Amino acid sequence: MAETIYILNGPNLNLLGKRQPEIYGYDTLADVEAACAEVAEAAGYAIRLLQSNWEGQIIDWIHEARNDAVGIVINPAAFTHTSVAVLDALNTFEGPVLEVHISNVHKREAFRHHSYVSLRADGVIAGFGTEGYALAVRRMVSLLG
Ligand code: DQA
């Protein structure tokens, strides 16, 4: 069975494509999933893309990833800037972690400039739109190689 890369998404990203499209674009999470699957599958990996508005659910999926995933790509959304608990959970994961932001958080409000998750992430992509996810999966494949 192919090894799995988890692609985790935090709050409000279920509305991707409808939510503030001037910032986040018109692609949906289903579009993101298709783009990531193409890159991963071409390299012999599977993906599991998940989204929750609940911090505890994200943490439970990170714990699950400890056994079921070889790498994590995560867009923690607003939890990026608030959650020590998500950071602590990621610190229990032994494989590579890549952080993705659709928008360029550094060009936005000051409260978006700090990321707890960046203390753990092996790389960060911000401001590449939804294309950032597939780029992160490509990088994940080379880190795993
Ligand atoms: C985001 C940026 C965060 O600041 C914001 O809270 C999000 C999405 C992004 O993908 O650009 O919900 O992570």
Image (spheres, rainbow, N blue to C red):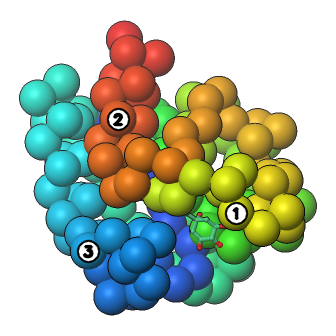
Left or right: 103 as drawn, with respect to 28: right
Mark 2 vs mark 1: give the one in front: 1
Q: Is residue 124 above or below residue 87?
A: above
Q: Is residue 29 visible?
A: yes
Say which of 7 and 29 sits in front.
29
At numbered mark 2, what does the secondary structure look like: helix, strand or loop? helix
Q: Which mark is residue 108?
A: 1
Residue 33 location (% of width, % of height): 24, 59
At numbered mark 3, what does the secondary structure look like: helix, strand or loop? loop
Residue 14 location (% of width, % of height): 40, 83
Looking at the rendered structure, the kind of residue marked 2 is Leu
Left or right: 57 as drawn, with respect to 137: right
Q: Is residue 38 above or below residue 31?
A: above
Looking at the rendered structure, the kind of residue marked 1 is Arg
The quarter of the image holding the N terminus is top left
Hey, which quadrant is residue 129 in on the image?
A: bottom left
Q: Is mark 3 within 8 Å of ligand 1?
A: no
Q: Which residue lies at the image location 85% right of the left edge and 63% below the top edge?
A: 110
Q: Is mark 1 within 8 Å of ligand 1?
A: yes
Left or right: 70 as drawn, with respect to 76: left
Q: Which mark is residue 135?
A: 2
Mark 2: few/some/many CA within 10 Å (<14, 14-19, 20+): some
Q: Which residue lies at the image location 17% right of the left edge and 27% below the top edge?
A: 44
Residue 112 location (% of width, % of height): 77, 62
Q: Look at mark 3 in the image and give the residue it sits on.
A: 26
